[in-house]
Image (spheres, rainbow, N blue to C red):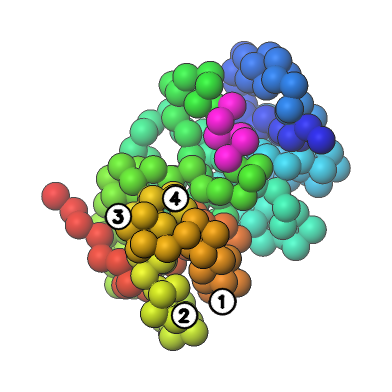
């Protein structure tokens, strides 16, 4: 079955370019195009999209608000949002991850990177490399009052439900490491890691790995290092 992709960007030229690229792949298809966030939410529901490529800056309902609407709608629990950003470092990206996005991608990325991002998101993984996690998420969560005032005490308490091993795995996930990398670091099998990740997600109420990363920082389990 093809991956159903929805394009949400206010620039028609970019949507056209993305459509040609996506539709050229045998395992995916574009099922709709939206020029603002409200339309993106509506089409995600009507067209049963699997992945939404979401621009942050759009007129009317922006990509951040649309991502939050998708992330809080039980009927859209299967939908994965990949944020498209013009800037590699953007504080809106962190807000998007908190809202439920599965990751982000620069608009200047290579075509193969975009296609790979769609497949990763559709598979339930997060588009968070170690560099992105440490250089962006940690940076913005540490700025201003984010390290304290924005930390959710309920999430901190919820960590008590995790086993010692689940906490260890969560720390590794927060570092942006894959299951295979975590397995090597902790000397366990990738299947064991996947089991711990799934259990942590269930206990913490996280949609995917991206939200696990944010929870790990917001709860204080992982402390960001800012230059």
Q: Mark 2 to mark 4: distance in Å?
A: 21 Å
Q: Residues within 10 Å of mark 3 (few under 14, many from 20)?
A: many
| Residue drawn at the location 53% of the way across and 21% of the way down | 112
Q: Which residue is mark 3?
A: 138
Circle 4 packing at 10 Å, graded few (<14), some (14-19), many (20+), is some
The local secondary structure at tag 3 comes to: helix
Please identify, in this view, whether the residue under mark 2 or under mark 4 is nearer the observer: 4
Disc 4 element:
helix
**Marks 3 and 2 in Cβ contact (< 8 Å):** no
Q: Residue at 36%, 62% (x, y): give it.
A: 187
Q: Residue furthest left?
A: 227
Q: Quadrant of residue 41?
A: top right
Which numbered disc flags the more N-terminal residue, 1 or 4?
Answer: 4
Q: Quadrant of the N terminus?
A: top right
Is mark 2 in CB contact (under 8 Å) with mark 4? no
Q: Nearer the viewer, mark 3 or mark 2?
A: 2
Q: Earlier in the sequence, mark 4 or mark 3?
A: 3
Mark carried by residue 180: 4
Q: Residue at x 33, y 46 (%)?
A: 130
Q: Position of residue 68 (x, y in %)?
A: 60, 55
Q: Which residues are the magenta region? A: 115-120
Read off the residue under disc 2: 162
> Where is 211 relative to 49, above or below?
below
Q: Nearer the viewer's eye, disc 3 or disc 1?
A: 1
Give the residue number, with chain letter if any, for mark 1.
203
Label 2–label 1 contact, CB within 8 A: yes
Q: CA distance from mark 3 to mark 2?
A: 22 Å
* Percent of width and height locating residue 80: 64, 47
**Front in this rendered view, residue 116 or 190:** 190
- Is residue 49 in view from this perspective? yes
Whether 225 is among the magenta residues is no
């Amino acid at each position: 079955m093809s991956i159903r992709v929805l394009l949400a960007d206010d620039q028609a030229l970019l949507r056209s370019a993305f459509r040609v690229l996506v539709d050229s792949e045998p395992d995916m298809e574009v099922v709709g195009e939206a020029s603002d966030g409200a339309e993106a939410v509506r089409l995600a529901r009507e067209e049963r999209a699997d992945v939404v490529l979401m621009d942050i800056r759009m007129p009317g309902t922006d990509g951040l608000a649309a991502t939050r609407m998708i992330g809080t709608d039980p009927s859209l629990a299967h939908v994965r949002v990949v944020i498209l950003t013009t800037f590699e470092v953007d504080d809106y990206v962190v807000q998007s991850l908190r809202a439920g996005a599965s990751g982000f991608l620069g608009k200047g990325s290579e075509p193969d990177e975009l296609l790979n991002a769609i497949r990763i998101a559709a598979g339930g993984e997060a588009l968070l490399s170690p560099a992105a996690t440490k250089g962006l998420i940690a940076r913005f969560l540490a700025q201003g009052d984010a390290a304290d005032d924005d930390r959710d005490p309920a999430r901190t308490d919820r960590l008590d439900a995790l086993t010692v091993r689940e906490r260890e795995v969560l720390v590794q996930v927060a570092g942006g490491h894959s299951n295979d990398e975590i397995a090597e670091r902790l000397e366990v099998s990738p299947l064991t890691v996947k089991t711990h990740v799934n259990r942590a997600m269930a206990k913490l109420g996280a949609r995917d790995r991206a939200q696990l990363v944010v929870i790990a920082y917001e709860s204080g389990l992982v402390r960001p290092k800012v230059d």
